[in-house]
Amino acid sequence: MTSTTASEFNVEQGLMELPGTPARWIWAFTCPEPKCACRTAVVLSLAGERELLLELGRPVADAWLRDATYGQTAQDLKGVTVFAVDLDTHELFSPVGDAPLNAAAHPEVREVADRLDDDVLDAIARVWEMGKGQLPLPDPGADGRRSR
């Protein structure tokens, strides 16, 4: 299996626009530990401009690259919706710890989580694979054929 190195991984691969309106961006950070099997991503989200999310989320990216406490850094951000999501079960969590997050008590999180469709979750899963040093599976239908 071919793998990528940390120096080849670009944390901005986790930056993507959510489907729907109004315009909203997310920046997903998956566990940087190569041997860790957890399938959780810390998600930062902001309505509006991509560049503002890049600016506000940069401390989280820097912490992730240093293999530091990026979840705590994310939790401390102001003006950004932040939560963690399990890529397999779609359960929501605080960016620090493993206690489930009650989305009903956090409407800003529910608004983002409701827009995490299968395509977005698949894209985050590909970021997870690349962050683990694996080459991701191709997008379904990337070869021009429809998947069944």
Image (tube, helix red, strand yellow):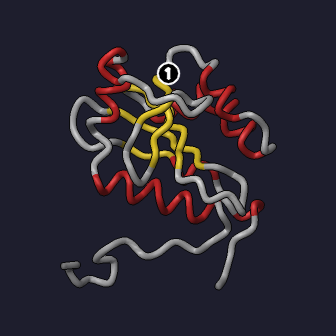
Q: Is residue 77 visible?
A: yes
Query: Badge 1 is on which residue?
Result: 80
Q: Quadrant of the N terminus?
A: bottom right
Q: Residues within 10 Å of mark 1 (few under 14, many from 20)?
A: many
Residue situated furthest front in the rendering: 99
108 and 84: which one is in front? 84
Q: How many marks?
A: 1
Q: Quadrant of residue 123?
A: bottom left
97 and 84: which one is in front? 97
Type of the residue with mark 1: Val
- Residue under the image location 34 percent in, 24 percent down: 103
Judged from the image, the secondary structure of the residue bearing numbered disc 1 is loop
Q: Quadrant of residue 47?
A: top left
Q: Position of residue 5 (x, y in %)?
A: 75, 67
Left or right: where 104 falls relative to 81? left
Q: Is residue 55 visible?
A: no
Please tell me whether residue 131 is drawn above or below residue 141 in the rendered image: above
- Residue under the image location 26 percent in, 83 percent down: 144
Q: Position of residue 125 (x, y in %)?
A: 47, 59
Q: Position of residue 106 (x, y in %)?
A: 36, 17
95 and 98: which one is in front? 98
- Residue under the image location 22 percent in, 33 percent down: 21
